[in-house]
Image: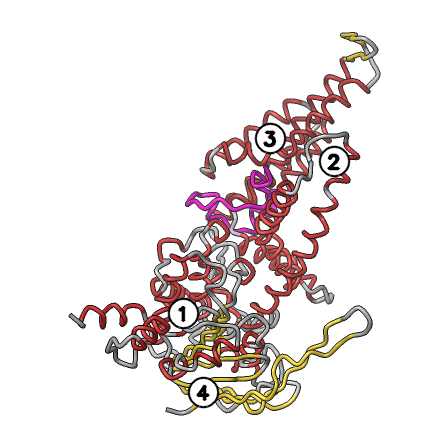
């Protein structure tokens, strides 16, 4: 399929006030990346690797210092197209509290469609549908700040899919959640991908990246690895140089292989590892 | 402690009062507040109190909620009560040590306390029974004539709705900072007023910094969701001014007229 996002030789600088003078920090240094429509890409990297800055460049929240980003063929620097770009490429943020605009769940979900100028009957139908999609239909009248972190994040996702974006950027949506909340959000992200949305997931959890079709590893403002999870996770040295670790299942499988246990090369998730180990006997 | 503050909170329920048009409730509350200052005697307060009680029953908001809203102003209430009680000159009824209670003082103390309680209850009832979105939409529509004079009514309404939305978030943030400071030995509960006041500075500074961080995050989230001001925006909830709304507005006006009339006649 065609590419929905194309980033070409992206450079992004920001200035940080230092003790003596303002210093310029290069957060992205020549990043080129194409995202295929309908794909599920995970962008991983440690704090400060530039992954979050990259995500915010992909829907025009940040504009590149040099290079360009095309979303559906529209340049993010084009003021006339910026709202089309953001509607095409929705974004879910890290902190569930700071992205909810309205106090009541359904009013918040309606915020995006209201901004797009959609008629009220249609908004109602969409709110109803997306709340059911994220499993929050029983909470539509509830006050958002009384919900759990995972529930708030589900409301935030509903608010984004109510705008019917083709692509959804998730900027570390699970970083502030407990394990149960993380699992719920991951399940919703997978379901959205199955439903045909293009998904870009920014994360520093390796295990989350294992579920993607493609893993992009960032370190020091550049892309250092890009490929299918099982290829990327083999590059243990590069991953460790980026101060990360391959998923537990990958490391364990590698050590077992070293000891002569015969395991297939495509083990990247714990479930698959368990499955293969059980089949050995 | 901070979590008890119900300022500006909404209590979801399906009642006659909840379903009223926000504009009626805003005008009604404003008229009622004027009533409270127009009325000069306890009979007037009895009538206004009865009217508020009727609305309370119709609104189906638990009394506990109302009382919790009154708790933070308890201190102000007690303070004004005693200030009036002891400071007003007139016919002395009791004398305790150097303090004297006068008939006029007692009258004024009771009068002011009732006025304050009714005032706070009525205004908290407005936010308790009206969704923040409807409240700010109503306000925006009431202010819309000013739009022609160049007043940015949509922006004002949006700011108000965000302020209401973030009261609990900022309270939670303040609570978190306080606990973090207490864990490191900060003391907020002893000493005189000045000491306590000074102890609040290490809370206020991180709270301000936090508020700016939240504002930055929220602005970005709103931009990502295509917010670009009031033009071209639609609403999920379209309020229609129905028969019940006219009746309610009429009742508020009758009460208002009665209060004015009594004041003029007596």
Q: Is residue B130 left or right of residue A134?
A: right
Work out which residue is located at the far left of the displayed protein and give it: A281
Q: Is residue A152 visible?
A: yes
Kindly report the distance in space between the C-alpha atoms of the residues bearing marks 3 and 2: 39 Å
Q: Which residue is mark 3?
A: B48
Q: Is residue A166 visible?
A: no
Q: Which residue is mark 4?
A: A4
**Which chain is disc 1 placed on?**
A
Point out the stretch of residues depicted in magenta. B1-30
Q: Nearer the viewer, residue A120 or B44?
A: A120
Q: Around disc 1, counting alpha carbons within 10 Å, would you say few (fewer than 14), some (14 to 19), or many (20 or more)? A: few
Compared with A157, A234 (above or below) is below
Q: Which residue is mark 1?
A: A122
List x then y, in percent, for residue A230: 35, 81
B140 falls in the magenta region = no
Kindly report the distance in space between the C-alpha atoms of the residues bearing marks 3 and 4: 63 Å
Kindly report the distance in space between the C-alpha atoms of the residues bearing marks 2 and 1: 54 Å
Q: Nearer the viewer, residue A36 or A274?
A: A274
Q: Which residue is mark 2?
A: B196
Quadrant into which the C terminus of chain B falls: top right
- Whether tag 3 and tag 2 are in contact, CB under 8 A, the answer is no
Kindly report the distance in space between the C-alpha atoms of the residues bearing marks 1 and 4: 26 Å
**Which chain is disc 2 placed on?**
B
Mark 4 lies on a secondary structure that is: strand
**Which chain is disc 3 placed on?**
B
Work out which residue is located at the far front of the displayed protein and give it: A259
- Image quadrant in which you'd find residue B76: top right
- The residue drawn where x is 46% and y is 81% is A216
């Amino acid at each position: 399929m065609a590419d929905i996002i194309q980033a070409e030789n992206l450079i992004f600088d920001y200035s940080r006030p230092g003790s003596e003078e303002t210093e310029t920090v290069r957060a992205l240094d020549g990043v080129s990346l194409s995202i295929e429509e309908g794909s599920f890409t995970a962008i991983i990297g440690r704090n400060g690797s530039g992954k979050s800055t990259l995500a915010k460049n992909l829907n025009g929240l940040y504009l590149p210092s040099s290079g360009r980003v095309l979303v559906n063929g529209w340049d993010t620097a084009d003021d006339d197209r910026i709202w089309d770009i953001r509607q095409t490429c929705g974004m879910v943020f890290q902190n569930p509290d700071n992205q909810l605009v309205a106090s009541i769940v359904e009013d918040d979900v309606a915020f995006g469609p209201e901004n797009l100028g959609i008629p009220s009957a249609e908004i109602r139908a969409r709110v109803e549908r997306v709340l059911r999609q994220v499993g929050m239909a029983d909470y539509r009248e509830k006050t958002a700040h009384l919900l759990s972190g995972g529930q708030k994040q589900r409301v935030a996702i509903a608010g984004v899919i109510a705008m019917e974006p083709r692509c959804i950027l998730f900027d570390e949506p699970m970083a502030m959640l407990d394990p149960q909340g993380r699992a719920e959000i991951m399940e919703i992200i997978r379901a959205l991908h199955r439903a045909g949305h293009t998904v870009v997931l920014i994360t520093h959890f390796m295990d989350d990246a294992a579920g993607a079709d493609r893993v992009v590893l960032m370190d020091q403002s550049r892309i250092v690895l890009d490929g299918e999870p099982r290829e990327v996770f083999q590059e243990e040295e590069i991953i460790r140089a980026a101060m990360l670790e391959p998923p537990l299942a990958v490391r364990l499988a590698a050590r077992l292989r070293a000891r002569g246990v015969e395991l297939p090369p495509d083990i990247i998730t714990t479930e698959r590892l368990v499955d293969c180990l059980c089949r050995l006997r | 402690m901070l979590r008890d503050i119900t300022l500006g909170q909404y209590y979801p329920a399906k009642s006659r009062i909840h379903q009223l048009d926000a504009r009626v409730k805003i005008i009604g509350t404003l008229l009622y507040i004027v009533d409270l200052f127009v009325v000069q005697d306890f009979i007037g307060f009895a009538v206004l109190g009865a009217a508020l009680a009727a609305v309370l029953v119709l609104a189906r908001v638990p009394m506990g909620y109302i009382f919790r809203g009154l708790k933070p102003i308890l201190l102000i209430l007690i303070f004004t009560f005693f200030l009036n009680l002891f400071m007003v000159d007139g016919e002395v009824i009791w004398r305790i040590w150097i303090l004297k209670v006068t008939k006029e003082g007692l009258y004024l103390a009771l009068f002011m306390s009732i006025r304050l309680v009714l005032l706070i209850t009525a205004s908290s009832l407005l936010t308790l029974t009206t969704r923040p979105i409807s409240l700010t939409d109503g306000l925006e529509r009431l202010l819309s004539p000013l739009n022609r004079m160049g007043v940015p009514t949509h922006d004002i309404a949006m700011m108000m709705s965000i302020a209401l939305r973030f009261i609990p978030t900022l309270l939670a943030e303040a609570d978190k900072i306080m606990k973090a400071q207490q864990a490191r030995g900060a003391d907020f509960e002893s000493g005189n007023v000045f000491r306590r006041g000074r102890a609040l500075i290490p809370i206020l500074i991180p709270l301000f910094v936090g508020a700016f961080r939240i504002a930055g995050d929220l602005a970005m989230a709103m931009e990502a969701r295509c917010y670009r001001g009031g033009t071209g925006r639609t609403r999920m909830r379209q309020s229609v001014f129905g028969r019940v709304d006219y009746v309610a507005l009429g009742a508020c006006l009758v009460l208002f007229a009665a209060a004015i009339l009594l004041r003029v006649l007596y």
